[in-house]
Structures are given as structure tokens and as C-alpha cells.
């Protein structure tokens, strides 16, 4: 039978361009993070570094005119502003003590207009509230009464979409999809058939479920994929109406026979403690989904992850095709999907290097088989990949079309910041 009729499209990888033919990157893991400008073809810093107050640039947003950068903090209620044109630190916005988790973290979601900055106030993995801050005065101009534990989010223009769950420890419950804009308007809908969250549900081990979120800003629709991979919730961001779709796996006759002999790792009936899914909207309208499962073990940190693989969902027919059964992580760089595994060193999961697929799911190239890889970022026609093999780490500047290494650089904790 025919699979999803997806087509391959090409698109440049997005990153923060400072307007001087350079990219914005972050040097981390040696004290406070430092901002630098990078040459796209060599990833070599070409500017003095700007020392930040935070150790990591976990969340950031660029002002509408491209002149300023806002950096959130994982450990404090603070947002730092940087002047990209004058290449200097500006000020830090300290959030009021009355906000939840004021001393626990601030995520930057979007900077849609000169006087409006959209943030999440609260600690990571705890209940947080979306707020709107005036970056000029530092004043909180809107604050949502709703609080939830965000699992995934996406922002574009005036709107931010968040997939959230309720308080940890009460067992997986119906997920919530919320929308928040710079005027302070909040819309939300309960996804009764999509479970999310952590806790003991009565019998068996506690479960930790993180569904996937993908947003198609062109059509104004959000998609939430259940952790078992069999159901998708489709939400109109205009009416906030929900429709559910059963996902049908496309398999060839040979594939069905093979699965009868040796079922996929994620489907072998083992008890699962953790299910994590992440999704990306592709330029051709397809949804790419990956993730991992972890069975319960004692101690829990020795649990060997079971890759969910890389799958493509076609929202026109709600058919699913498994592109590659081995990855557990995905980066989308324009029209290229970069699939890999990540290892904690003691989880017994071998590296698969880096595999590049087009948006139709066809393999374009594969590199670094057996090595551990980290995609540090991408820009235009290039990706920047950390490769570790035999205890040695290097940064490769890779041509996305061919997979060819254009240049290698000595290893450092550096990454390209994306819009």
C-alpha cells in the first residue's frame, strides 16, 4: 500500500543573525555564559565576548527590530537585556517577589513588539504563570491567573502556545493546551484524551508522560501527539475547538511480517515508567515525532532508554510512517531532519552518529556511525555538530545538503542561538 504522500522541500536553517554577516552564539559551562559573534563558515568567534549573569542561555528572544536580546534565567526571577548593535550589556529586569517562583526561574517566550516581552515566571518542572513585561520600564503589564507545568511551547508573533500539565505527583491527567498573547489574553482547552504528568495512578509503577506538541502557524493549528503514538489532538488556534484523530501506521507487507517476528523495541510489552515525546512541524506540513521510553528499574537512573524512533505523521490522512526505528532525538534545520541518539554513558545505548533525512523521510546522508553527537545549532545551509569518539571531541561545520565536513574546530561548549 502507498505511504503518506509527503514531498521533500528545501528551506534554510534559522538562527539569530546579528545583521553583520555573523551569527549569535553562547559559550557555556565555564562560569557565566558569554555571548559572541560567530562566522557561519568556521564557527570562529569574531567579536569580544559579553559576559552574562547566567551560566546558560536556556531561553532567549530578539526584539522586533533585531537590536536587542532578552535572556532568561533558570535560577532567578530576572531577565537580562543586551544591545546587539552596540554590543554591550544593558539592564536586568527583576520580576516582583509576588510572582510564583520569583527566585526559581524565568523563561523568555517571545518579544512581539517594542514594549512587550512575554515570559514564563516560575521554576522549571514546577507550576508557572505567563506574564507580559514592558522591557523599557521593567513593569509587569499583564499576568495570567492560570498556572500550570509547561511541557513544551512555541511562539510566533503575538501568540505563544503552551502544552502543560497539572501538579506533579497526582498521576497523569488530561493535558492542557493554552494560548497567551502580548495583550494578556489567555485561551485554554482541556485535552481529555491526551494524558500528561507524573505520579502514581493506583497500580503498578508511577508514570511520567510527556506528549509532543507541534504548531503550524501558517494554518493556525496545534497538534498534540499522545505518548503511545496512536492519537493526535488537533486544536484550532482561532476557535479553540478540539478534534481527535486515530493515527494509522503505514507498513509494507514485509514490514508487517518483520514486526511479527521481532516487534519494535517500544512495542514489546515492557512496563514503562517514562514516556517522552517531542515533535517538530516540517516545512511540507508533516509532523516529525521522536522520543524515548524508560522501563522502571532500581535504581531508576540505570534505566536503559528504548528509542521511539523517528516517525512522520501526515495530517491530511493521519497516517504514520516510521522513518528510522533507532533515533531518540531530533533537530530540524530548515528542510533537513537531523536524527541521533544521546547517551548518559551508563545507559547501555550505543551511539548511531548523525542521520539526515529530507522532509519526505528519505535518507540524505549518514555520518559518524557509533559516535555520540550533539547538534549545537544550524544556520542557512550549515549545521554545527559536536562529535565524540574514543574520548576525543571536535566541532564539525557540516554542509546540510551533502553531509560533508567543511571545517573542524577544537571542542568547546558553544551553540548557535535560534530565533
Image (cartoon, grey):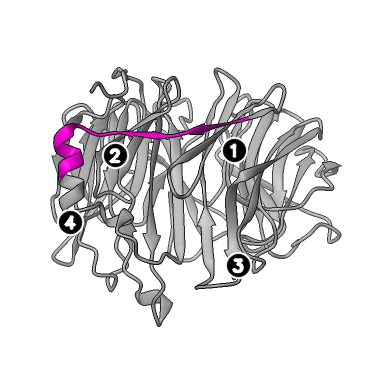
Give the mark, 3 or 2, whose residue is nearer the N terminus: 3
Give the distance between the C-alpha atoms of the residues marked 1 and 4, in whole angstroms.
Answer: 32 Å
Residue found 81% across the figure and 35% down from its top: 184
The answer to whether residue 301 is seen in the rendering is yes
Label 1: which secondary element: strand
Residue 75, label in figure: none
* Residue position for label 3: 201
Q: Which quadrant is home to the N terminus? A: top left
Residue 338, label in figure: 2
Residue found 69% across the figure and 57% down from its top: 166
Give the mark, 2 or 4, whose residue is nearer the N terminus: 2
Residue 371, label in figure: 4
Given residues 402 and 289, the one toward you in this image is 289
Residues rendered magenta in the picture: 243-257
- Which of the 4 quarters of the picture holds residue 405? top left
Label 4: which secondary element: loop
Give the mark, 3 or 1, whose residue is nearer the N terminus: 1
Amino acid at each position: 500500500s502507498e505511504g503518506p504522500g509527503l514531498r521533500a522541500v528545501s528551506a534554510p536553517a534559522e538562527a539569530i543573525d546579528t545583521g553583520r554577516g555573523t551569527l549569535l552564539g553562547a559559550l557555556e559551562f565555564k562560569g557565566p555564559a558569554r555571548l559572541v559573534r560567530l562566522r557561519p563558515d568556521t564557527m570562529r568567534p569574531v567579536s569580544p565576548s559579553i559576559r552574562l549573569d547566567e551560566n546558560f542561555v536556556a531561553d532567549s528572544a530578539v526584539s522586533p527590530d533585531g537590536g536587542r536580546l532578552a535572556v532568561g534565567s533558570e535560577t532567578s526571577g530576572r531577565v537580562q537585556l543586551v544591545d546587539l548593535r552596540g554590543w554591550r550589556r544593558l539592564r536586568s529586569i527583576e520580576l516582583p517577589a509576588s510572582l510564583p517562583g520569583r527566585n526559581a526561574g524565568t523563561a523568555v517566550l517571545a518579544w512581539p513588539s517594542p514594549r512587550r516581552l512575554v515570559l514564563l515566571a516560575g521554576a522549571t518542572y514546577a507550576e508557572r504563570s505567563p506574564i507580559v513585561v514592558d522591557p523599557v520600564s521593567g513593569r509587569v503589564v499583564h499576568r495570567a491567573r492560570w498556572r500550570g507545568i509547561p511541557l513544551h511551547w512555541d511562539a510566533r508573533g503575538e501568540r505563544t502556545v503552551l502544552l502543560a500539565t497539572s501538579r506533579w505527583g497526582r498521576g497523569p491527567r488530561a493535558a492542557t493546551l493554552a494560548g497567551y498573547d502580548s495583550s494578556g489574553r489567555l485561551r485554554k482547552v482541556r485535552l481529555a484524551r491526551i494524558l500528561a504528568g507524573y505520579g502514581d495512578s493506583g497500580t503498578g509503577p508511577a508514570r511520567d508522560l510527556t506528549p509532543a506538541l507541534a504548531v503550524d502557524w501558517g494554518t493556525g493549528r496545534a497538534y498534540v501527539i499522545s505518548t503511545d503514538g496512536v492519537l493526535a489532538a488537533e486544536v484550532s488556534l482561532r476557535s479553540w475547538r478540539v478534534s481527535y484523530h486515530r493515527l494509522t501506521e503505514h507498513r509494507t507487507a514485509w514490514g508487517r511480517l518483520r514486526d511479527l517476528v521481532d516487534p519494535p523495541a517500544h512495542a514489546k510489552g515492557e512496563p514503562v515508567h517514562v514516556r517522552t515525546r517531542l515533535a517538530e512541524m516540517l516545512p511540507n506540513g508533516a509532523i516529525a515525532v521522536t522520543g524515548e521510553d524508560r522501563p522502571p528499574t532500581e535504581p531508576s537512573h540505570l534505566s536503559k532508554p528504548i528509542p521511539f524512533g523517528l516517525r512522520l505523521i501526515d495530517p491530511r490522512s493521519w497516517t504514520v510512517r516510521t522513518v528510522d526505528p533507532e533515533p531518540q532525538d531530533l533537530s530540524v534545520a530548515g528542510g533537513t531532519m537531523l536524527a541521533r541518539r544521546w547517551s548518559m554513558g551508563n545507559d547501555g545505548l550505543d551511539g548511531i552518529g548523525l542521520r539526515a533525512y529530507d522532509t519526505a523521510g528519505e535518507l540524505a546522508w549518514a555520518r559518524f556511525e557509533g559516535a555520540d553527537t550533539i547538534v549545537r545549532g544550524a544556520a542557512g545551509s550549515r549545521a554545527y555538530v559536536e562529535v565524540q569518539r574514543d574520548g576525543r571531541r571536535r566541532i564539525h561545520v557540516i554542509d546540510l545538503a551533502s553531509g560533508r565536513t567543511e571545517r573542524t574546530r577544537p571542542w568547546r561548549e558553544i551553540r548557535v542561538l535560534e530565533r
